[in-house]
Amino acid sequence: MMIARSTDTPRRFSPSAIVPPIVIAGAAALLRLPVALAYPRIAALLFLWIASDAMMLGLIARHRRPGWRAGVAALAAAGMAVFSLSPPPIRAALLTMPWALAVPVCAIALHGGWGLWRVVERVRHWDRRDPDRWPDLLAEILPRLLGRFAVAEARLLHLALFRWNAAPDVPSGAKAFAYHRHLQPMMIALLLLSCIEIGVTHLLVAHWNRTLALILFAISDVSLVYLIGLIKSLRLAPVLLTETGVRIRAGILVDRTIPYADIAGVAADPDGGTVRAADSWNVALLAWPNLILHLDPALPPRSRWRGEPVRAIVLRLDEPGRFLDELRVRLDTPRVTGEI
């Protein structure tokens, strides 16, 4: 069973997606002013109006004709922001006006009920082969980007804390080529230095401000967990030669498949000018690359800040010679140059 959506997802990032949260956060900060606390009912109504208006205008700016569910979700998000960001006096004043709460409460109840029903439908028709099943499930209640972020965070934490001595991710029919043997020692050394730096910084800051020290300690712990996940992912996500193309991977940072037909040539030991060129994508991380893939046609720019199309990918493998031999067999014509 296919589950259709009532609204279209915007194809690219729009400033209208970030402006409403900024407006709501600014309005929430103004609620702490003495004049707002002196007139809590007026401040509560103004905050509710600003939050609802910001979310609806942002929705209309992103979608010319938003569906009814998108409108209900926007009002529900505005209501949740008002309830969670208002200081206690403003929240108490808002609760004394049930007529003002009718719209946000109904929107939250309708959005939550509809989302739960869609979640039940997805669970009933669960497809374990779908890689996007968990983001799609969370997207029934949360914004899609937030759902994908939550799934990515859960997978990273599971990787960092639980997947010890796991086998590398190599699908059937693919050949794997490792690149972690030169990277892991350097990153483990970086991890140890980070632990020492975090301990010293925590002790120094704790003498000055204990609250700030606890905040930095929490941030540092999360960063260490992420770094552990990244180090482990280098071994678990090797570069692959699949049936359709070269799957370029760099741990949890890069995962892109390049079809064999798009590879114009492969060379060993690229020169510095080529590696540092604006149209080269360096996925070798902390080491100097020993392979370069020339692409034709070029890949689209990686971001709006990197306007050049990607015409070459440089990488470093632990066994570049074996990679070149295997790739020579899979390419339609001999295009491999360079010596190892």
Image (cartoon, grey):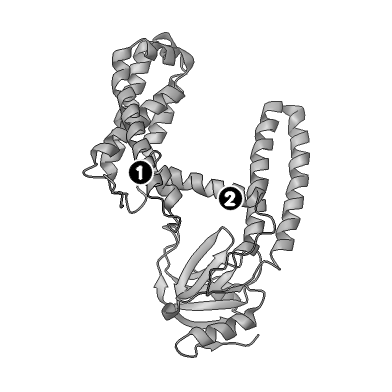
Kindly identify which residue carries mark 2.
156
Residue at the image point whose x is 43% and y is 48% from the top: 135
**Residue 257, placed above or below residue 9:** below
Q: Is residue 55 visible?
A: no
Label 1 SS = helix
Is 291 in front, or is 34?
A: 291
Callouts 2 and 1 close, C-beta under 8 Å: no
Circle 1 Cα neighbour tier, 10 Å, few/some/many (<14 / 14–19 / ≥20): some
Looking at the image, which residue sits at the far bottom? 334
Q: Nearer the viewer, mark 2 or mark 1?
A: 1
Coordinates of residue 269 in the picture (x, y in percent): 62, 80
Residue kind at label 1, given as amino acid type: Glu
Residue at the image point whose x is 25% and y is 40% from the top: 60
Looking at the image, which residue sits at the far front? 124
Looking at the rendered image, the quarter that the C terminus falls into is bottom right
Looking at the image, which residue sits at the far left? 65
Label 2 SS = helix
Residue kind at label 2, given as amino acid type: Leu
Earlier-in-chain disc, 2 versus 1: 1
Residue at the image point whose x is 45% and y is 24% from the top: 84
**Residue 116, placed above or below residue 127:** above
Residue at the image point whose x is 70% and y is 32% from the top: 213
Kindly identify which residue carries mark 1.
121
Task: Please state if 197 lies on the left or on the right of 308 as rendered.
Answer: right
Coordinates of residue 148 in the picture (x, y in percent): 46, 48
Give the CA separation, mark 2 to mark 1: 27 Å
Is 245 in front, or is 283?
A: 245
Q: Is residue 100 visible?
A: yes
